[in-house]
Amino acid sequence: MPKQNALAATLQAPPLGLLFTEPVRALLDFCAAHVSVTPRQRGDGHPVIVYPGLGGGALSTVVLRNFLRDRGFAVQDWGGGLNTGPDGELDEWLGDLVARVRELHARTGRKVSLVGWSLGGVYAREVAKLCPEAVRQVVTLGTPFGAMQDANHAGTIYRLLGGDTSQLTPEMQARLRECPPVPTTSVYSRTDGLVCWRGCLQDEGDCVQNIEVNASHLGMGSHADVMRIVLDRLAQPENKWKPYRKIRRATARRPSTRSRAR
């Protein structure tokens, strides 16, 4: 089988069973986050912009933004209102997002971290490519930058909402797969009901990592594990990025039979 055909065979939209259970699983993710243990990590006050997914606005990311704000980051909504997709030519449309990052960088004297959920993650990655000097790192949540055309239900929803997919030429899709020249983390879930999880994977390197969670797509912004990962990534000292390592709870060792006999 040719390489391209083999790749296409792995990039398939999630089963309909996962799609139909998304709302219920997202609600469970939200409830579980409110009974989880509060992480001890703190931020250093640097600016963070959070980009919502398709069809989402400021309200959709409020849980994540409040979580990060309470832990010491200067968090902002993306300021674009409801995310209905790019309006017109992509680079021209991205201009306002790039200008905001540069202005925030100039005003605070701090590089800006970008967190993007689903389609918002595409914006975060592309903005970082256009102004890497102003970006500290990028974290994406369920962002299928490697499968933006047909291998996800989000693309179907986008077309139903009247979105223009004519820009998704092979050249554009290849561009979207390219990693930004800044530390980049992609959080993905094999139980994502909207996007192909394989499309969220990037080639790992010195400052590039994929991290798997067990979450719904709609619940990623309020999932306890996801929020811990985002906090951990953002809390790293600038220019000292290291791969994420899951903290395992220590288990008490039971005394051996020999020890108990003595």
Image: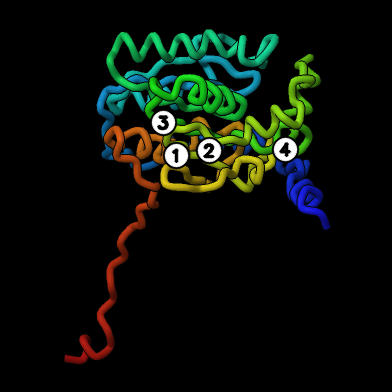
CA gap between label 3 and label 4 equals 30 Å
Residue shown at 29% from the left, 40% from the top: 240
Q: Earlier in the sequence, mark 3 or mark 1?
A: 3
Badges 3 and 1: C-beta atoms under 8 Å apart?
no
Marks 3, 1: nearer the viewer: 3
The secondary element bearing badge 1 is classed as helix
Residue bearing the label numbered 1: 224
Residue bearing the label numbered 4: 19
Q: Earlier in the sequence, mark 1 or mark 2?
A: 2
Image-based side of 178 in relation to 241, left or right? right
User: What's the residue type where badge 3 is placed?
Assistant: Gln
CA gap between label 2 and label 4 equals 15 Å
Vertical arrangement, residue 212 with respect to residue 259, above or below? above
Residue bearing the label numbered 3: 137
User: What's the residue type where badge 1 is placed?
Assistant: Ala
Q: Position of residue 54 (x, y in %)?
A: 64, 22
Image-based side of 199 in relation to 156, left or right? left
CA gap between label 2 and label 3 equals 26 Å
Can you tell which quarter of the image residue 144 is in?
top right
Residue 61 seen: no
Marks 3, 4: nearer the viewer: 3
Q: Nearer the viewer, residue 55 or 126?
A: 126
Badges 4 and 1: C-beta atoms under 8 Å apart?
no
